[in-house]
Image (tube, helix red, strand yellow):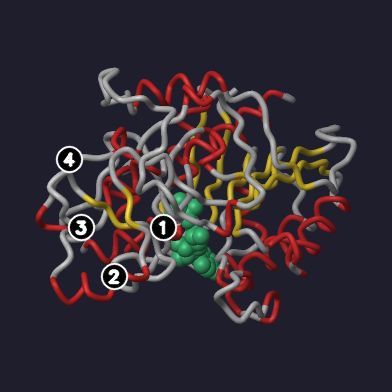
Amino acid sequence: MVLRVLELFSGMGGMHCALDLSGREYEIIAAIDINPTANLVYASNFPEVSIINRSIETIPLKQWEKWSADLWTMSPPCQPFTRQGKQEDLNDRRTDGFVHLMKNILSQLNSKPKYILLENVFGFQNSDAHQLLLHTLQSNHYSYEQYLLSPIQFGIPNSRLRYYLIAKQQDQLNTNASVLQTRISNFDRLLTKLHEQFPSKCGGSYDKNSLHRNDQITDQCSHSSEILIDSNQSMLINDFLVSNENSEFELDDKQLKRGLHVCDIITCHAKRSFCFTKSYGKYFEGTGSLFRTETDRIRYFTPKEIANLHCFPQGYHFPEEITNRQAYALLGNSLNVFVIGVLLENLFERC
Ligand SMILES: C[S@@+](CC[C@H](N)C(=O)[O-])C[C@H]1O[C@@H](n2cnc3c(N)ncnc32)[C@H](O)[C@@H]1O
């Protein structure tokens, strides 16, 4: 059976890319997002998908009945819940789309999706929006599992601790659904695929298990992350680079003066990088790591390299009219495709 998928808050299409990893036959019946830049990038990568440039809260129930989707994927806006923001939660108008989905759509729909996958920032789990989500799922006979996971747990050298929920209608996913799990199983198949996609570039000359002197970063977000792989499976920043040197992305003298003091600077041997946010390239502090090249130049990671760290497929691209700033903003809002792939694997396994 071809899985009918609605990609809600679709951004640059991270969920779509993760579905490709799942091996399931699927069709994205619509991708919905109000950001024209995101939609342009999405369309350039997936021209066959119908993209709806419209607020979710303006789409009436009858349209959702018509779609009759099997799976909803969603990454609702995270600003109402981030530590840097005002944490206005449900009082922030940016949650309107999510609230509409919970109260006016999922609760009323005859053709409810069998599966739901939701991603949000660390912190969402303490919000009223989270309470609304769990309450709506329970009253509509979904069982669910909740996770806090970061790519670094799978040996991907990037911290991005996120809240995830997978839900299935009328099934026992987990008897203890209220527990936030920080471990997940069932990822070996995808890990093999990932290592094929980003093979080690070290050629055996470098000991992957030793830390480099520059590989010392503090990421407050990853405090609860437990490493789930053997140490010989961890990957290095080098495996995700397009090239070591790239003069176009080097910092100028003024930027160096400011950036050197507040930024994490890592080399190709690093096993970690700081979580890349939508302000990467705009501000330094807490927005993502900088890269020290072999000739000791300091540069930004390129958008393609961050997309690689997010495990987007090799063929994923940004159209020429998209500026680097725009690409960084989309990537900062996006997700790690591998981690979503693992969650889908776990969700579908319980079919
Ligand atoms: C966290 S990002 C989603 C990232 C996406 N999963 C990806 O892979 O890029 C949230 C997205 O929701 C969109 N959005 C915010 N409010 C919306 C609304 N009311 N209706 C539709 N889209 C909305 C934003 O434009 C943004 O692209």
Q: Give the residue pinned by disc 4.
A: 243
- SS at badge 1: loop
Q: Give the residue pinned by disc 1.
A: 276
Q: Few, some or many C-alpha atoms within 10 Å of disc 2 (few <14, some 14-19, many ≥20)?
A: some
Of the two numbered discs 4 and 2 in the rendering, the one whose residue sits closer to the viewer: 2
Q: Residue at x 60, y 57 (%)?
A: 120
Q: Amino acid at mark 2?
A: Gly
Residue 347 circle label: none
Q: Quadrant of residue 244?
A: top left
In the image, 171: left or right of 44?
Answer: right
Residue placed farthest to the left in the image?
247
Q: Few, some or many C-alpha atoms within 10 Å of disc 3 (few <14, some 14-19, many ≥20)?
A: many
Residue 259 circle label: 2
Which is more N-terminal, label 1 or label 2?
Answer: 2
Q: Few, some or many C-alpha atoms within 10 Å of disc 1 (few <14, some 14-19, many ≥20)?
A: many
Q: Label 2 near label 3: C-beta < 8 Å?
A: yes
Q: Amino acid at mark 4?
A: Ser
- Quadrant that contains the N terminus: top right
Of the two numbered discs 1 and 3 in the rendering, the one whose residue sits closer to the viewer: 3
Q: Quadrant of residue 255?
A: bottom left
Q: Residue at x 41, y 53 (%)?
A: 51
